[in-house]
Amino acid sequence: MKVDVLLGLQWGDEGKGKIVDYLSPQYDLIARFQGGPNAGHTLVINGEKTVLHIIPSGIFREEVQNVIGNGVVIDPHILMKEIDGLKAKGLSLHNLFIAKKAHLILPTHRYLDAASENAKGKQKIGSTLKGIGPTYMDKTGRNGIRVGDIFSPNFMEKYNGLKEKHQALLQIYPDIEFDLEGEEERFHEAVERMRSLQTIDGPYFINKALKEGKRILAEGAQGSMLDIDYGTYPYVTSSNTVTAGVCTGLGVAPKNIGKVIGITKAYCTRVGSGNFPSELFDENAETLQRVGHEFGATTGRPRRCGWIDLPQLKYVSMINGVDEICLTKIDVLNEFESFGVVDAYVENGQQTDRIPYDLNENIGVHTTQVEGWNKDVKAQQFAELPDKAQAYIKYLEAQLNTPISLISIGPGRDEIVLR
Ligand code: GDP
Ligand code: IMO
Ligand code: MG
């Protein structure tokens, strides 16, 4: 067996949570491999909405194992709050497993995130302020504290050592308000509770499951354009969000990667700072935002909106090795008489498909107008979709040279059309 992958092809919020929840009955195990509580994955089940930040989106299927892999960074307080919320909805959480090599987000990581962003002023990343950057810095700087350390008799010694380093580092930034004492109290309470969770040796757990023939799906967080290496650096997150991240984040050999499903909206959004070539600033942006309810699931910030960007999608398909595409939120285009597709960038008067080294603000875009279907897309089968919606999907398939196998037409669990 191989590990299938579902990951975002844009700047996040493509609808990963919904699709993973939909696909999870086809799998025995769902695993998050990177990121942390900066993610917000929305599931709408029987009209009831749940936003998951750290727990994989297969958790509502009791027979499916859900693994938080070692590439993830975990905030104990947020994890325990999420667990409490799911238990209140009647889930047992017997199917949740946490890799011991996953790193912990300390209160002072969040403090540093906030102080660093504040000091950047206009250049700020627009971080979710969940402490992601500083935690991955400590991981690669070999200073981090991992889930497995909470069982060590000298956990407090390690904790205090790292906290002191952070306090020294905080001196270089202008003062900001942060209730460190209160945050530490909540952190230690949560760590105490985490000791009774099912922790695992991630790579052995996953590879044993593979050997036993279990079907595994790796669930990406963020999107490929937020990847630390291949995204719009420095306006990115601090992990590898692309397919390669599955190998390091779960301990899976490259040869054991199976099908890669890339997910994209029928248009494009971005939250936080950084370049967004196909961004719109007109009434089309307002319509996309209003109809698509484009507000961050983690921070509530309004998402910037624009047209789908083909050079961008071709670039990330190359890096991820995308086999199939899942297209979401096509219903958000229902109101449009016509809408745009960015099919090329324009540099020095020349059209190009190539993403430049620095996706700077001056890059021009070439937009093609597509006729809208201008009615509801209630459908169960591809053939029931309006003709113009079918034509749009076929056009994207031809442009991206990849089949679109799943089409999402609403937030609900079953609002899906299979191709
Ligand atoms: P994720 O981070 O990739 O899991 O995506 P988010 O949950 O942050 O954002 C996607 C938003 O779109 C959520 O509010 C979903 O409920 C919603 N959504 C997902 N698929 C569709 C769809 O096909 N149509 C509509 N209208 N909403 C959708
Ligand atoms: P999901 O998994 C959208 C963005 C932030 C910011 C940048 C860095 O729900 O798709 P960080 O907190 O990681 O330091 O923020 O990345 N960002 C996301 N945008 N969806 C996400 O996750 C995101 N996670 C981080 O807005 O621009
Ligand atoms: Mg999200």
Image: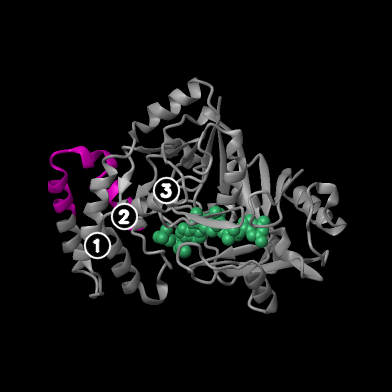
Using residue 358 as the reference point, say whether residue 267 is left or right of it: right
- The residue under label 3 is 87
Image location (x, y in percent) of residue 412: 64, 54
Using residue 329 as the reference point, say whether residue 269 is left or right of it: left
Which quadrant of the view contains residue 132?
Answer: bottom left
- The residue under label 1 is 183
Residue 250: in magenta span = no
Name the secondary structure under disc 1.
helix
Residues under labels 2 and 1: Cα distance? Answer: 9 Å
Which kind of residue does numbered mark 1 sit on? Glu
Q: Main secondary structure of the magenta part?
A: helix
- The residue under label 2 is 77
How many numbered dots are placed on residues in this image? 3
Image location (x, y in percent) of residue 328: 67, 54
Name the secondary structure under disc 3.
helix
Q: Is residue 236 above or below residue 256?
A: below
